[in-house]
Amino acid sequence: MFDILISKDMVKKIAFLLKTFPDREWSGPAFYDVKFEKNGFPKKYILKYFKPIDLGGTSDTEFSGELLNSFIPKIWKEHPETQDLSCGLIHSHHNMGAFLSATDTEQMEESIKDSKAKDDSFYPSLVVSSKSGARYHFGVAYKDMYDYISIIEFKEKHIHEEGVKIRVPSTWVDEVKFIKAEDKKKTAALFTTYSKNKWTRNGNITQYNPQQLNLAEFPTNNGMGTATLAKSAMNITEKLPRELSLIDKEAIATDKVLLGTYYRMFQTRMWGLEEEALTIMEEILDKSEDLGMITDAECITLTNELYSPDALDDTEIYNQGYGL
């Protein structure tokens, strides 16, 4: 049985891209550190790096060999460690659940068939999704001594990830900008943007009333019944992250009930679509951890959930902690 591990920075990069493109597929080359058995068969795959180079539609993503070949030298130059890694594929199924489709397995077979490497080479492919319970699916294609191509598949329960708090590097944002720009050459891009008091989706503007949620009272699961926020606290929860003052941030970080309320507002109103907002929310969580209001493990979980909001309903901390 293989051991498949997704390194800590790639865990967050995957979540970042899935949130950025919630209903579209993306793909690119992925680089894996492979450990082998004495008989030459792989026993462990570790995803060390990947680069998205294509933004597809709701059910497809593909890129040409020419495009891939144009990127490989650049990747090797920027990340020299990838030269010693096994190159395969990563692509998303957004919210459909991760699995290897017939098209995916056909692509893997063609890749191993066309490989100029030695006969016992292997071609790894990882599918990722935001759907809870089906976030990962991994496959390896290889050619045996009879030139027969086989594919071994592994579901999410066999795939492990390293979770940790890290900032979103500017290079990830640049990669998103690149595939968006390239996609505009193929078709009009479909994404959501936000400006104060306005949501824009595919050119349609929808107004919302910031007073539409009554935050004066909200249920808790900590045995304390109903918590009540002061008027000043209510004003804080209605502010966008970039509108928070230093005093506001301090107030949120030092009050569990207020932290929980603001965290919920941040997720339900999708403020995380702004990179600056994500940075501010992470700073508040870090401050709360430093003050001992939340544990390191809780801080890591909440930070990672900022980049994977669809999983919130399954998160015990979100449902039971911080006055929610």
Image (cartoon, grey):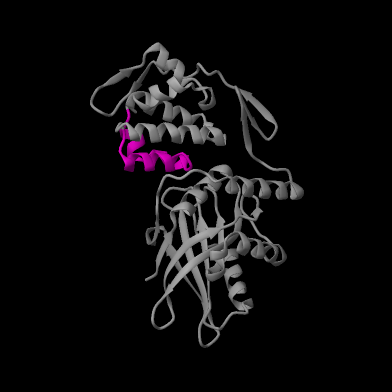
Q: Position of residue 226 (x, y in %)?
A: 29, 19
Extreme left residue here? 223
Q: Which region is colored magenta?
A: 294-322
Extreme top residue here? 231
| Front residue of this view, candidates 126 and 287 | 287
| Front residue of this view, candidates 102 and 71 | 71
Residue 103 in the magenta stretch? The answer is no
| Front residue of this view, candidates 85 and 306 | 85
Q: Is residue 28 above or below residue 276?
A: below
> Is 221 left, or right, of 194 in this rendering?
left
Q: Is residue 130 above or below residue 270?
A: below
Q: Position of residue 115 (x, y in %)?
A: 61, 77
Let me know if residue 315 appears in the view: yes
Q: Position of residue 134 (x, y in %)?
A: 44, 53
Extreme right residue here? 185
Please state, as top left, top right, bottom left or bottom right, where the C terminus lies in the image.
Answer: top left
Residue at 50% of width from left, 55% of height from top? 128
Please state, as top left, top right, bottom left or bottom right, where the N terminus lies in the image.
Answer: bottom left
Q: Is residue 225 above or below residue 44?
A: above
Residue at 63% of width from left, 47% of height from top? 174
